[in-house]
């Protein structure tokens, strides 16, 4: 993820305002707020500016994913070229959803909020959709998870850990 974040910072940082690069990176799957904060740190964006930009950027696609992902997957499965990709994504989300089914709200919040590879708002939306979780409940859990992930990554990306330990 760091190499992707560095690439975005280098490729777009000289051509586009730093805040716009942070926003764009935060919108993208895999990178999300984690990558957005890394880019913000690399481009020297003040943390007070970076935090809301990354949260907003990360959250914009989530309601659409929650509302339309299952329909989109059903549609794409009709085409043989897309079917393997969709089935792989469904299988991946299903494997994650079984671990979350008991405490689905808290499980989804922590799944999105703990910045590990393969977690985040995009995957959390797929998991919530495949679990049949109510949209409002899933949206709140994912939002709180994005806030948690953003705070954790702010500590890491901006070197705040050293300030907290002192």
Image (tube, rainbow, N blue to C red):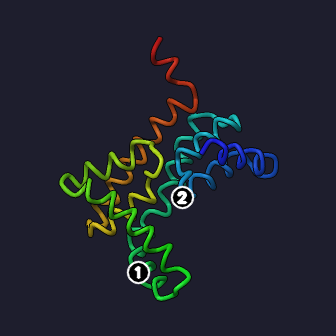
Residue at image coords 35%, 59% = 139
- Left or right: residue 37 versus residue 102 is right
Residue 27, image x and y in percent?
56, 57
* CB under 8 Å between discs 2 and 1: no
Judge by depth and name the residue closer to the eye, 59 or 73.
73
56 in relation to 84, above or below: above
Q: Which residue is mark 1?
A: 71
Judge by depth and name the residue closer to the eye, 159 or 7.
7
Q: Secondary structure at mark 1?
A: helix
For the residues marked 2 and 1, what is the alpha-carbon distance in whole angstroms? 19 Å
Q: Which mark is residue 155?
A: none
Residue at image coords 81%, 46% = 14
Residue at image coords 50%, 61% = 60
- Quarter of the image where one finds residue 97: bottom left
**Pointer 1: residues within 10 angstroms few (<14), some, or many (20+)?**
few
Judge by depth and name the residue closer to the eye, 7 or 146.
7
Q: Quadrant of the N terminus?
A: top right
22 in relation to 95, above or below: above
Q: Secondary structure at mark 2?
A: loop
- Left or right: residue 131 versus residue 148 is left
- Quarter of the image where one finds residue 65: bottom left
Outermost residue toward the top?
166
**Pointer 2: residues within 10 angstroms few (<14), some, or many (20+)?**
some
Q: Which residue is mark 2?
A: 29
Residue 106, image x and y in percent?
25, 48
25 in relation to 153, above or below: below
Outermost residue toward the right?
14
Residue at image coords 52%, 24% = 160
Residue 99, image x and y in percent?
26, 53
18 in relation to 151, above or below: below
Residue 32, image x and y in percent?
53, 51
């Amino acid at each position: 993820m760091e190499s992707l974040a560095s690439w975005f910072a280098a490729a777009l940082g000289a051509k586009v305002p730093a805040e716009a690069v942070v926003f764009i990176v935060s919108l993208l799957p895999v990178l999300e707020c984690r990558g957005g904060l890394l880019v913000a740190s690399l481009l020297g964006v003040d943390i007070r500016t970076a935090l809301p930009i990354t949260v907003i950027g990360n959250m914009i696609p989530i309601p659409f994913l929650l509302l339309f992902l299952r329909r989109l997957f059903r549609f794409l499965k009709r085409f043989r070229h897309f079917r393997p990709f969709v089935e792989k994504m469904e299988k991946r989300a299903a494997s994650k959803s079984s671990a979350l089914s008991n405490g689905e709200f808290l499980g989804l919040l922590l799944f999105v909020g703990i910045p590990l590879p393969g977690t985040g708002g995009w995957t959390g939306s797929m998991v919530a959709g495949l679990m049949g979780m109510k949209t409002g409940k899933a949206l709140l859990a994912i939002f709180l998870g994005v806030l948690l992930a953003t705070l954790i990554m702010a500590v890491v990306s901006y070197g705040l850990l050293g300030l907290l330990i002192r």
